[in-house]
Amino acid sequence: MSEKAKILVIEDDLYTRDLYIEVLNGAGYEVVAAVDGEEGVLKASEGGYNLILLDVMMPKMNGLEVLKALKEKPPQKQNGPVVLLTNLAHDPVIKEALELGAKNYLIKSDMDPAQLLNKIKSYL
């Protein structure tokens, strides 16, 4: 891969966000982070991300609100798939998010860094 894949991580939990940034940077990805849904929408609106990892439960705007905002006002440059980050496997929110265009979801508590990277590769 000549050009680094660019991944946007929208995650309000500092520990989780730092972990994802460290793991993804270590694997050679270019990582941009947003600390809440509002910042996530601003950054995602710029476009050009190969993948967006989106937390579901966040302050200001939750993951569903972020998906709705991006659907209503698509970015200038297209983004790759949006994959939800959640700890809720059978939540109705997941179904709604998939209907809003999220490609899939990852259960944060079920994944170690190697599993995370394998999932990421499958979406890129």
Image (cartoon, rainbow, N blue to C red):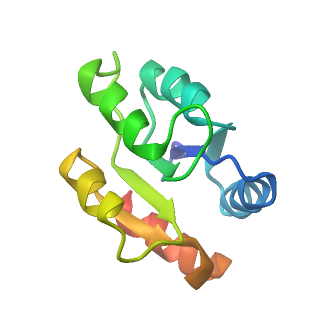
Looking at the image, which is closer to me, 94 or 76?
94
The image quarter containing residue 96 is: bottom left
State left or right for residue 120 relative to residue 23.
Answer: left
The number of discs equals 0
Looking at the image, residue 83 lies above or below residue 108: above
Residue 23: % across, % down: 71, 64
The image quarter containing residue 113 is: bottom right
**Residue at screen point 42% across, 25% down:** 47
Q: Quadrant of the C terminus?
A: bottom left
Residue 89: % across, % down: 41, 76
Residue 20: % across, % down: 68, 59
The image quarter containing residue 98 is: bottom left
Q: Residue furthest left?
A: 99
Residue 90: % across, % down: 35, 76
Looking at the image, residue 97 lies above or below residue 107: above
State left or right for residue 46 relative to residue 21.
Answer: left
**Residue at screen point 40% across, 35% down:** 65
**Residue at screen point 18% across, 51% down:** 99
State left or right for residue 109 relative to residue 56.
Answer: right
State left or right for residue 113 relative to residue 56.
Answer: right
**Residue at screen point 47% across, 29% down:** 44
